Image (tube, rainbow, N blue to C red):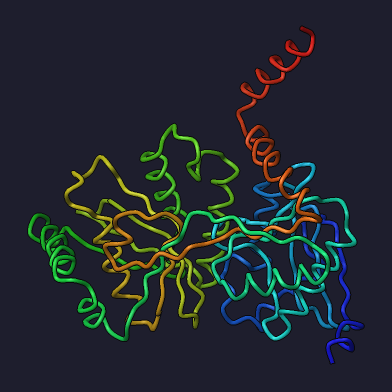
Amino acid sequence: MLSTALTDLHSRTVSWDDRLSPQLRRDWENLITACPHTPVFSYPDWLEMAVNAQVIKPCCLLTIYLGKHPIGIIPLHKRTYWTAEVCYPLSEDFPAMVIDPQAEELAWYGFMLWCKAYSRFGLLSLGRWRNCLQIEMVQQTAFETGLFPFTRRIEPDIWISFPESWAEYLASLNTDIRRNLQRREKQFRQDFGEGFAVDILTGNQITRERVDELITLHRQRWHGQRGSYFDHERNTDFYREITCWAAGKGYLVMPVLRLNGKTITLATIFHLPGQQIAYAHCMARDVEALPNNYSPGIVLFTHFFRWAIARGIKHVSMGIGTSYYKRLFGGREYQRSELFIARSRREARVLMKIDPAVYILQHLPVEMQMRFREYRDNAHHQ
């Protein structure tokens, strides 16, 4: 049976030309239909918008077929001359790829055969994973095709899981935390009365002006610090586009905390209707409006979690990082690993040392890159 399937297994590589062909888009959307847990970050629209905004630049789009049916679509882009990785249009948690769960093993086998025949990359990252069984399956498939797979532990992410009701969720927290949450909201109500409000915005309630508010407050908080998501104008343009697109589709939730009509803190949470998982992405706060002891972010998420439980959402991914507020809500830490494929053990050792340094140099400010070149040229002449 397997040998028969392998004879029907083939891959097709398409060079990226800014937009997906109608057929490839249909194939991608059909695969998403077959993958009920696919997050919104993996939608083809997301990848197209990221490319148009020049946030990423895919070098190729790999489609794996079983006969005439696509069972996997994996967009790749080059990190450095020797290395490549699966595209991450925005979230560090999920790459923009889709694999048919009913033919997952065959899809990865087809991918490894392509890697074996395609010699342009010495090291390829398949992204950040936390499913141990899935990692083992992909590693075993790589071994069977003569490739060398290995993992590198990276920063964990935090997930919060909910029972059936808000009362059950509160009961699952320890007494001190439960009292702490109640005390923080009580403080707002006592000090601000009817001027205190938290709204959960969805659909066309989320306007471009609300998104701009979030961007402005986020910049205010992280102004001048490299690594902030909005430290480059192309990222800002992309975020406006994808949030407005997601809101129009009903894929975005935005809780907003206001005092006397003024926005104090707000967040973006991506959630596909019918899925039991929501993904918290970006939170911003007016740091000059209130002293820290009010903790408006904690109050904001208290209201969102109550809203989420009432709508049957079972899990919220709080993303990477182990901030205090995530643990306060009973968040559970999940260790993640980045999965790599190399042609040999020796190639992996060499490229794992060289690639990070080259990648960092490529992303330094232009002024620093010029200084490094001057230093290199001077050292060469001496």
Residue situated furthest front in the rendering: 346
Q: Quadrant of residue 110?
A: bottom right
Residue farthest along the bottom direction in this orientation = 1
Please state, as top left, top right, bottom left or bottom right, where the N terminus lies in the image. Answer: bottom right
Q: In the image, is residue 161 above or below residue 290?
A: below
Q: What is the residue that sits farthest to the left in this orientation?
A: 190
**Picture quadrant where residue 268 is located:** bottom left
Estimate the x, y position of residue 112 in percent, counting from the top left: 80, 67
Instruction: Please say whether residue 190 is visible from this viewpoint.
Output: yes
356 or 219, which lies in front?
356
Left or right of residue 272: residue 289: left
What residue is rendered at 28% in x and 42% in y? Answer: 287
Location of the C terminus by quadrant is top right
**Residue 198 percent location from the top left of the image:** 26, 64
Query: Residue 35: horizontal and vertical position, in percent?
Result: 63, 81
Asked whether residue 26 is in view, the answer is no
Rendered position, 377 above or below 314: above
- Looking at the rendering, which quadrant does residue 219 occupy? top left
Instruction: Point out residue 307 in the picture as x, y percentages from the top left corner.
Output: 32, 75
Residue occupying the point 74% across, 65% down: 74
Q: Is 147 or 256 nearer to us in this picture?
A: 147
Residue beneath the point at 81% across and 65% down: 62
**Number of marks drawn:** 0
For residue 61, above or below residue 323: below
Q: Nearer the viewer, residue 223 or 9?
A: 9
